[in-house]
Amino acid sequence: MSRKPSPQRTKAQLVEELNALRVMEREHRLLLDESSDPIFAFFPDGRYRYVNHAFAAGVDRDRRDIVGHSIWDIFSKEEADRRFAAVRWVFENGQSKVIEVRVPRADGDRDYVTTVKPIFGDHAEVVSVICVSKDITERRIMEEKLARMALHDGLTDLPNRVLVADRLGQALSEAVRRDSRIALMLVDFDDFKAVNDTLGHSAGDLLLQQAARRLLACVRKSDTVGRLGGDEFVVVVPGIEDERDAMVLAEKIRRALNQPFELPGSGCKSISSSIGVAIYPDHGRSEIELSRNADGAMYQAKSRGRNRVQLFQPHCEPESIAGHPAVSLALRASELTPAPLE
Protein backbone atom coordinates (compact mmCIF):
# COMPACT_ATOMS: atom_id res chain seq x y z
CA MET A 1 0.00 0.00 0.00
CA SER A 2 1.50 3.33 -1.12
CA ARG A 3 1.82 6.11 1.33
CA LYS A 4 0.41 9.54 0.47
CA PRO A 5 2.84 12.44 0.71
CA SER A 6 2.39 14.77 3.62
CA PRO A 7 0.53 17.97 2.65
CA GLN A 8 2.89 19.95 4.92
CA ARG A 9 5.93 18.48 3.13
CA THR A 10 4.47 19.18 -0.29
CA LYS A 11 3.86 22.80 0.66
CA ALA A 12 7.44 23.08 1.93
CA GLN A 13 8.70 21.68 -1.32
CA LEU A 14 6.63 24.17 -3.31
CA VAL A 15 7.97 27.04 -1.20
CA GLU A 16 11.50 25.78 -1.73
CA GLU A 17 10.97 25.51 -5.48
CA LEU A 18 9.44 28.98 -5.57
CA ASN A 19 12.39 30.42 -3.70
CA ALA A 20 14.77 28.65 -6.05
CA LEU A 21 12.93 30.15 -9.02
CA ARG A 22 13.18 33.60 -7.47
CA VAL A 23 16.92 33.18 -6.93
CA MET A 24 17.33 31.98 -10.49
CA GLU A 25 15.30 34.95 -11.75
CA ARG A 26 17.50 37.36 -9.78
CA GLU A 27 20.61 35.67 -11.20
CA HIS A 28 19.30 35.93 -14.74
CA ARG A 29 18.26 39.52 -14.16
CA LEU A 30 21.73 40.31 -12.82
CA LEU A 31 23.34 38.69 -15.84
CA LEU A 32 21.15 40.72 -18.18
CA ASP A 33 21.50 43.99 -16.26
CA GLU A 34 25.27 43.80 -15.89
CA SER A 35 26.14 42.34 -19.28
CA SER A 36 28.64 44.44 -21.20
CA ASP A 37 26.55 43.83 -24.32
CA PRO A 38 23.47 46.05 -24.82
CA ILE A 39 20.30 43.98 -24.30
CA PHE A 40 16.78 45.34 -24.76
CA ALA A 41 13.24 44.12 -25.42
CA PHE A 42 10.19 45.60 -27.15
CA PHE A 43 6.43 45.58 -26.90
CA PRO A 44 4.69 45.21 -30.30
CA ASP A 45 3.93 48.94 -30.44
CA GLY A 46 7.61 49.92 -30.28
CA ARG A 47 7.81 50.72 -26.57
CA TYR A 48 10.81 49.41 -24.68
CA ARG A 49 9.89 46.57 -22.37
CA TYR A 50 13.37 46.20 -20.89
CA VAL A 51 16.86 47.68 -21.33
CA ASN A 52 20.05 46.85 -19.46
CA HIS A 53 22.71 49.25 -18.20
CA ALA A 54 24.91 48.81 -21.27
CA PHE A 55 22.08 49.86 -23.60
CA ALA A 56 21.22 52.88 -21.46
CA ALA A 57 24.88 53.94 -21.38
CA GLY A 58 25.14 53.42 -25.13
CA VAL A 59 22.37 55.93 -25.84
CA ASP A 60 23.50 58.17 -22.97
CA ARG A 61 20.22 57.97 -21.02
CA ASP A 62 18.90 56.68 -17.71
CA ARG A 63 17.05 53.36 -17.88
CA ARG A 64 13.98 54.96 -16.29
CA ASP A 65 13.85 57.39 -19.22
CA ILE A 66 13.78 54.52 -21.72
CA VAL A 67 11.60 51.68 -20.39
CA GLY A 68 7.97 52.30 -21.32
CA HIS A 69 8.98 54.91 -23.87
CA SER A 70 8.87 54.49 -27.63
CA ILE A 71 11.93 53.90 -29.79
CA TRP A 72 10.93 57.11 -31.58
CA ASP A 73 11.52 58.95 -28.28
CA ILE A 74 15.11 57.73 -28.22
CA PHE A 75 16.25 57.96 -31.84
CA SER A 76 15.50 60.22 -34.79
CA LYS A 77 12.45 59.17 -36.83
CA GLU A 78 14.58 57.95 -39.73
CA GLU A 79 16.86 55.90 -37.46
CA ALA A 80 13.95 54.59 -35.34
CA ASP A 81 11.99 53.55 -38.45
CA ARG A 82 15.00 51.65 -39.77
CA ARG A 83 15.68 49.88 -36.48
CA PHE A 84 12.09 49.00 -35.68
CA ALA A 85 11.52 47.61 -39.18
CA ALA A 86 13.64 44.61 -38.15
CA VAL A 87 11.81 44.27 -34.83
CA ARG A 88 8.41 44.48 -36.56
CA TRP A 89 9.52 41.80 -39.03
CA VAL A 90 10.40 39.46 -36.14
CA PHE A 91 7.04 40.13 -34.45
CA GLU A 92 5.24 39.30 -37.70
CA ASN A 93 7.30 36.29 -38.79
CA GLY A 94 8.40 34.74 -35.52
CA GLN A 95 11.96 34.27 -36.77
CA SER A 96 15.30 35.69 -35.66
CA LYS A 97 17.06 38.41 -37.63
CA VAL A 98 20.58 39.89 -37.50
CA ILE A 99 21.20 43.55 -38.36
CA GLU A 100 24.06 46.05 -38.07
CA VAL A 101 23.37 49.46 -36.55
CA ARG A 102 25.36 52.59 -35.75
CA VAL A 103 24.65 54.54 -32.56
CA PRO A 104 25.54 58.25 -32.69
CA ARG A 105 27.45 59.44 -29.63
CA ALA A 106 29.09 62.70 -28.65
CA ASP A 107 32.39 60.89 -28.08
CA GLY A 108 32.24 59.03 -31.40
CA ASP A 109 29.76 56.73 -33.13
CA ARG A 110 29.64 53.08 -32.10
CA ASP A 111 28.81 50.16 -34.40
CA TYR A 112 26.88 47.09 -33.28
CA VAL A 113 25.72 43.79 -34.76
CA THR A 114 22.33 43.02 -33.20
CA THR A 115 20.53 39.69 -32.99
CA VAL A 116 16.75 40.18 -32.83
CA LYS A 117 14.88 37.16 -31.41
CA PRO A 118 11.16 36.44 -30.78
CA ILE A 119 9.75 35.50 -27.36
CA PHE A 120 6.67 33.25 -27.64
CA GLY A 121 3.58 33.10 -25.40
CA ASP A 122 1.51 30.08 -24.35
CA HIS A 123 -0.29 29.99 -27.69
CA ALA A 124 2.84 30.28 -29.88
CA GLU A 125 2.22 33.97 -30.45
CA VAL A 126 5.14 36.44 -30.33
CA VAL A 127 4.63 38.44 -27.14
CA SER A 128 7.96 40.22 -27.07
CA VAL A 129 11.14 40.68 -29.06
CA ILE A 130 14.51 40.74 -27.36
CA CYS A 131 17.65 42.19 -28.93
CA VAL A 132 21.25 41.43 -28.02
CA SER A 133 23.92 43.71 -29.48
CA LYS A 134 27.66 43.21 -29.81
CA ASP A 135 29.96 46.20 -30.13
CA ILE A 136 31.99 45.78 -33.32
CA THR A 137 33.42 49.30 -33.44
CA GLU A 138 37.03 48.20 -32.95
CA ARG A 139 36.63 45.50 -35.59
CA ARG A 140 35.16 48.02 -38.02
CA ILE A 141 38.02 50.45 -37.36
CA MET A 142 40.57 47.69 -37.93
CA GLU A 143 38.85 46.59 -41.15
CA GLU A 144 38.89 50.18 -42.40
CA LYS A 145 42.57 50.50 -41.53
CA LEU A 146 43.43 47.28 -43.35
CA ALA A 147 41.40 48.35 -46.38
CA ARG A 148 43.20 51.69 -46.40
CA MET A 149 46.60 50.05 -46.07
CA ALA A 150 45.84 47.92 -49.13
CA LEU A 151 45.22 51.02 -51.24
CA HIS A 152 47.56 53.65 -49.77
CA ASP A 153 51.29 54.14 -49.49
CA GLY A 154 52.52 53.47 -45.96
CA LEU A 155 55.01 56.36 -45.90
CA THR A 156 53.02 59.24 -47.43
CA ASP A 157 49.43 57.94 -47.08
CA LEU A 158 48.93 58.79 -50.76
CA PRO A 159 47.07 56.35 -53.04
CA ASN A 160 49.36 53.51 -54.07
CA ARG A 161 49.73 52.15 -57.60
CA VAL A 162 46.64 49.90 -57.24
CA LEU A 163 44.37 52.80 -56.29
CA VAL A 164 46.02 55.15 -58.81
CA ALA A 165 45.39 52.59 -61.56
CA ASP A 166 41.75 52.42 -60.58
CA ARG A 167 41.40 56.22 -60.45
CA LEU A 168 43.06 56.53 -63.86
CA GLY A 169 40.70 53.91 -65.28
CA GLN A 170 37.69 55.77 -63.89
CA ALA A 171 38.98 59.07 -65.25
CA LEU A 172 39.45 57.56 -68.71
CA SER A 173 35.93 56.12 -68.71
CA GLU A 174 34.53 59.50 -67.70
CA ALA A 175 36.61 61.26 -70.38
CA VAL A 176 35.19 58.94 -73.04
CA ARG A 177 31.62 59.71 -71.92
CA ARG A 178 32.20 63.47 -71.71
CA ASP A 179 34.62 63.78 -74.63
CA SER A 180 37.08 65.54 -72.31
CA ARG A 181 40.83 65.47 -71.70
CA ILE A 182 43.05 64.06 -68.97
CA ALA A 183 46.63 64.90 -68.03
CA LEU A 184 48.84 62.19 -66.56
CA MET A 185 52.05 63.40 -64.94
CA LEU A 186 54.96 61.39 -63.63
CA VAL A 187 57.18 63.23 -61.14
CA ASP A 188 60.64 61.91 -60.35
CA PHE A 189 63.30 63.57 -58.19
CA ASP A 190 66.71 64.11 -59.76
CA ASP A 191 69.43 62.13 -57.97
CA PHE A 192 67.33 61.30 -54.92
CA LYS A 193 69.76 58.50 -54.13
CA ALA A 194 72.29 61.12 -53.05
CA VAL A 195 69.88 62.26 -50.31
CA ASN A 196 69.69 58.78 -48.84
CA ASP A 197 73.43 58.22 -49.24
CA THR A 198 74.51 61.49 -47.61
CA LEU A 199 71.72 62.23 -45.11
CA GLY A 200 70.34 58.77 -44.43
CA HIS A 201 67.05 57.04 -45.25
CA SER A 202 65.18 58.74 -42.40
CA ALA A 203 65.92 62.14 -43.93
CA GLY A 204 64.91 60.78 -47.32
CA ASP A 205 61.60 59.57 -45.90
CA LEU A 206 60.91 62.99 -44.35
CA LEU A 207 61.62 64.65 -47.68
CA LEU A 208 59.17 62.34 -49.47
CA GLN A 209 56.48 63.03 -46.87
CA GLN A 210 56.92 66.78 -47.30
CA ALA A 211 56.92 66.37 -51.08
CA ALA A 212 53.59 64.54 -50.88
CA ARG A 213 52.05 67.44 -48.94
CA ARG A 214 53.38 69.96 -51.48
CA LEU A 215 51.94 67.95 -54.36
CA LEU A 216 48.53 67.82 -52.71
CA ALA A 217 48.64 71.58 -52.15
CA CYS A 218 49.14 72.13 -55.88
CA VAL A 219 46.11 70.20 -57.17
CA ARG A 220 42.33 70.18 -56.91
CA LYS A 221 40.31 67.77 -54.76
CA SER A 222 39.13 66.07 -57.95
CA ASP A 223 42.73 65.26 -58.95
CA THR A 224 44.67 62.22 -57.73
CA VAL A 225 48.21 62.33 -56.35
CA GLY A 226 49.81 58.95 -55.77
CA ARG A 227 53.18 57.41 -55.02
CA LEU A 228 54.38 54.62 -57.29
CA GLY A 229 57.37 53.77 -55.12
CA GLY A 230 60.82 55.15 -54.37
CA ASP A 231 60.93 58.83 -55.25
CA GLU A 232 58.38 58.66 -58.06
CA PHE A 233 54.94 60.24 -57.82
CA VAL A 234 52.01 60.34 -60.22
CA VAL A 235 49.31 62.97 -60.74
CA VAL A 236 46.01 62.28 -62.56
CA VAL A 237 44.27 65.48 -63.66
CA PRO A 238 40.84 64.96 -65.29
CA GLY A 239 38.87 67.63 -67.10
CA ILE A 240 41.68 69.82 -68.44
CA GLU A 241 40.95 72.25 -71.28
CA ASP A 242 44.17 71.88 -73.24
CA GLU A 243 47.89 71.09 -73.05
CA ARG A 244 48.65 74.54 -71.68
CA ASP A 245 46.58 73.86 -68.54
CA ALA A 246 48.57 70.69 -67.93
CA MET A 247 51.92 72.37 -68.48
CA VAL A 248 51.05 75.29 -66.17
CA LEU A 249 50.12 72.86 -63.38
CA ALA A 250 53.22 70.72 -63.97
CA GLU A 251 55.44 73.80 -63.78
CA LYS A 252 53.68 74.84 -60.56
CA ILE A 253 54.50 71.41 -59.12
CA ARG A 254 58.13 71.59 -60.26
CA ARG A 255 58.63 74.98 -58.61
CA ALA A 256 56.95 73.83 -55.38
CA LEU A 257 59.25 70.81 -55.19
CA ASN A 258 62.31 72.96 -55.94
CA GLN A 259 61.83 74.88 -52.69
CA PRO A 260 64.25 73.74 -49.93
CA PHE A 261 63.04 70.95 -47.67
CA GLU A 262 63.42 71.42 -43.91
CA LEU A 263 64.79 68.14 -42.57
CA PRO A 264 65.13 68.11 -38.75
CA GLY A 265 68.65 67.08 -37.84
CA SER A 266 69.85 67.47 -41.41
CA GLY A 267 69.16 71.13 -42.15
CA CYS A 268 67.74 72.31 -45.48
CA LYS A 269 68.01 70.28 -48.64
CA SER A 270 67.20 71.42 -52.16
CA ILE A 271 66.53 68.88 -54.88
CA SER A 272 65.12 69.25 -58.37
CA SER A 273 62.60 67.08 -60.16
CA SER A 274 61.76 66.04 -63.70
CA ILE A 275 58.13 65.81 -64.77
CA GLY A 276 56.72 63.98 -67.79
CA VAL A 277 53.25 64.87 -69.07
CA ALA A 278 50.96 62.90 -71.40
CA ILE A 279 47.48 63.98 -72.48
CA TYR A 280 44.44 61.83 -73.24
CA PRO A 281 43.49 61.33 -76.03
CA ASP A 282 46.42 63.00 -77.86
CA HIS A 283 49.13 60.76 -76.39
CA GLY A 284 47.19 57.60 -75.65
CA ARG A 285 43.69 56.22 -75.25
CA SER A 286 44.45 53.39 -72.84
CA GLU A 287 45.98 53.27 -69.37
CA ILE A 288 49.00 51.40 -70.69
CA GLU A 289 49.67 53.76 -73.59
CA LEU A 290 49.13 56.92 -71.55
CA SER A 291 51.30 55.70 -68.66
CA ARG A 292 54.08 54.58 -71.01
CA ASN A 293 54.13 57.94 -72.80
CA ALA A 294 54.07 60.01 -69.60
CA ASP A 295 57.01 57.94 -68.41
CA GLY A 296 58.78 58.46 -71.75
CA ALA A 297 58.27 62.22 -71.40
CA MET A 298 59.79 62.11 -67.92
CA TYR A 299 62.86 60.33 -69.32
CA GLN A 300 63.08 62.97 -72.03
CA ALA A 301 63.09 65.65 -69.32
CA LYS A 302 66.00 63.94 -67.59
CA SER A 303 67.94 63.45 -70.81
CA ARG A 304 67.54 67.15 -71.65
CA GLY A 305 69.16 68.37 -68.45
CA ARG A 306 66.72 67.47 -65.64
CA ASN A 307 64.79 69.96 -63.50
CA ARG A 308 62.23 70.54 -66.21
CA VAL A 309 58.70 69.73 -67.41
CA GLN A 310 58.41 67.77 -70.63
CA LEU A 311 55.30 67.14 -72.71
CA PHE A 312 55.38 63.78 -74.48
CA GLN A 313 57.05 63.81 -77.90
CA PRO A 314 56.43 60.92 -80.31
CA HIS A 315 60.15 60.28 -80.87
CA CYS A 316 60.57 59.01 -77.29
CA GLU A 317 62.34 55.63 -77.33
CA PRO A 318 59.96 53.09 -75.73
CA GLU A 319 62.73 50.55 -75.11
CA SER A 320 64.33 52.91 -72.58
CA ILE A 321 61.33 52.68 -70.28
CA ALA A 322 60.40 49.01 -70.46
CA GLY A 323 59.82 47.52 -67.03
CA HIS A 324 59.64 50.92 -65.33
CA PRO A 325 57.16 51.20 -62.38
CA ALA A 326 54.76 53.40 -64.33
CA VAL A 327 54.55 50.90 -67.16
CA SER A 328 54.22 48.07 -64.66
CA LEU A 329 51.39 50.06 -63.04
CA ALA A 330 49.43 50.22 -66.27
CA LEU A 331 50.09 46.59 -67.14
CA ARG A 332 49.02 45.50 -63.67
CA ALA A 333 45.86 47.59 -63.95
CA SER A 334 44.93 45.99 -67.26
CA GLU A 335 45.55 42.49 -65.92
CA LEU A 336 43.63 42.91 -62.67
CA THR A 337 40.84 45.15 -64.01
CA PRO A 338 39.82 46.08 -60.43
CA ALA A 339 36.27 47.11 -59.56
CA PRO A 340 35.73 50.87 -59.05
CA LEU A 341 36.81 52.10 -55.65
CA GLU A 342 35.53 54.95 -53.55
Image (cartoon, rainbow, N blue to C red):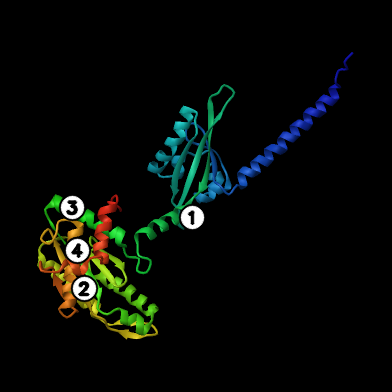
Q: Furthest residue to the front?
A: 319
Mark 2 vs 3, N-terminal side: 3
Q: Is residue 242 above or below residue 93?
A: below
Query: Mark 3 or 4, which is nearer the eye?
Result: 4
Please, what secondary structure does the residue beneath circle 1 have?
Answer: helix
Marks 3 and 4, how far apart in space? 20 Å
Q: Is residue 169 above or below residue 47?
A: below
Query: What is the quadrant of residue 246 in the picture?
Result: bottom left
Query: Which quarter of the rendered picture does the N terminus lie within?
Result: top right
Asked whether 120 or 327 is in front, the reply is: 327
Marks 2 and 3, how far apart in space? 25 Å
Amino acid of disc 4: Arg
Place of residue 323 in the rendered image (x, y in percent of width and height, measured from the top left): 25, 65
Circles 1 and 4, Cβ within 8 Å, touching? The answer is no
Amino acid of disc 1: Glu
Query: Mark 2 or 1, which is nearer the eye?
Result: 2
**Label 3, on which residue?**
174
**Label 4, on which residue?**
292
**Label 2, on which residue?**
253
**Label 1, on which residue?**
138
Circles 1 and 3, Cβ within 8 Å, touching? The answer is no
Mark 2 residue crowding within 10 angstroms, few (<14) / some (14–19) / many (20+): many
Marks 2 and 1, how far apart in space? 39 Å
